[in-house]
Structures are given as structure tokens and as C-alpha cells.
Amino acid sequence: MTAPAPAPRPRLGLPLLFTTYLALVTWLVLWKLGTPAIGDPGSRVIKLVPFVAAGGSGASEPVELVLNLVIFLPFGVYLGLLVPAWPWWKVAGTLAGASALLEVAQYVLAVGSSDVTDVVVNTAGGLAGLGVVALARRTFRARTAAVMTRWCAAGTTLALLAAGLFVASPVRLTGPPPGDVVVGCPDDAAAGHESPCRG
């Protein structure tokens, strides 16, 4: 009886794509595709109760939950391709650990709200990605790695292009960066006269 052949090791392209994806997710989660910086320590927020309003924070928005699922789905795809021998619970632990690390980083850097909801939803999104790989193996069989690598390359490239277009656009996910001129109406008291902005 012959021993089963070991799973082929992933080529250099897949780890490189995964590294690019991780860098992009880190940039998105911590700095919302803006300039990396440390925020105001007084703005730190921790929400320990998932989904519902608690601790002065509102309930989780459905749109944000869906976005988190979509953002972390490729994480599970990459893990399913890079470490195919891992059981699902080990993948889940890695996903939860990575998500928790991002939440801790947000707290330390004071760049966002640290929310347990994100850990739960991000882990679920990654497990959905693992399910995509399992479905692909049943469909493509021996061609799974090649087909999924092409899809990962296309998806990561599109994500990079989208991030580049976002950075080049005037739209921002946070307030204007330091040094930007904000056009608006001055405060009446500070201006010393009636504001022309009032009708």
C-alpha cells in the first residue's frame, strides 16, 4: 500500500499575493487607506458586547457587517490554499487571532473603535472563504490551486487598483488629514460679526 502523496507546496506567487492582501487589509482597517498616524489617546473606544448598542457605542450597522465579511473572505481562501492540511478550527483560530490583533492595534494606536463584533464577523468571513476553497476542490479537483491562484491574483490586483483610485480621489473614510484646508463657515462669536452662512 503506497502512502498518499503530500500536498504540493504553494508557489512563490501565492504567498506574495497573500502578503499583499494582508498589507492592504491592515492599511484599510487601521488607517482607512489614509496616511498612517497615531490618533488621539482620548478617542479610544472598546465595545465588548457584539452587534448591539453597549458602552456608549451604537449597534453594528448591517453594511459594515457585510463589508467585514467580504474583506476577510479572501483571508480564508488564502489559508485554505496555503495550508490545506489545517483543520477548520485551526483556520478559525488564526482568523480570530489576526482580527483580534488588528483590534488591539486600533486601540494602541487610537485610530478606531475596538469592537468584538469585528472579530466575530471577520472570523465568519474567513471561514466562508475556506468554504469557497472546499467547494472549488470538489469542482476543479487537481486544477483547484491553479484556478484559485488566478482568481486570487485578479482579486488582489483589482483591490490594489481600487485602493489607488480611492487614494487619488478627494473622498476619505475619515476626516481631512492635517494640513488640508477645510472650507466652511466661521463661528459667529469668533468672527465678530453675523455669519453670511445663515439665511
Image (tube, rainbow, N blue to C red):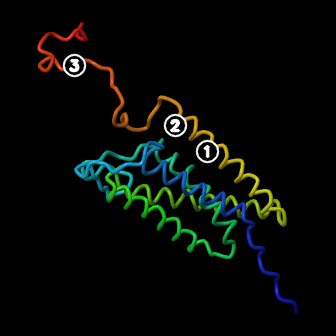
**Secondary structure state at the residue bearing disc 2:** helix
* Tag 3: amino acid: Pro
- State the residue in front, 31 or 118: 31
Q: Quadrant of residue 136?
A: bottom right
Q: Is residue 96 left or right of residue 145?
A: left
Question: Where does residue 84 sit, x and y in percent of width and height?
Answer: 69, 72
Number of other residues with Cα within 10 Å of mark 3, as a class: few under 14, some 14 to 19, many 20 or more: some
**Mark toward the start of the polypeptide (2 vs 1):** 1
- Horizontal placement of 74 versus 45: left or right? right
- Give the Cα separation between the discs numbered 3 and 1: 39 Å
Callout 1 environment at 10 Å: few (<14), some (14 to 19), or many (20+)? some
Residue 35 drawn at (x, y percent): 43, 44
Tag shown at residue 167: 2
In the image, residue 114 sits, relative to residue 171, either above or below, namely: below
The residue indicated by pointer 3 is: 186
Residue at x 18% of width, y 20% of height = 187
What residue is shown at x 67% (from left), y 46% (from top)? 157
What is the crowding at mark 2: few (fewer than 14 residues within 10 Å), some, or many (at least 20)? Answer: some
Q: Secondary structure at mark 3?
A: loop
Residue beneath disc 1 = 160
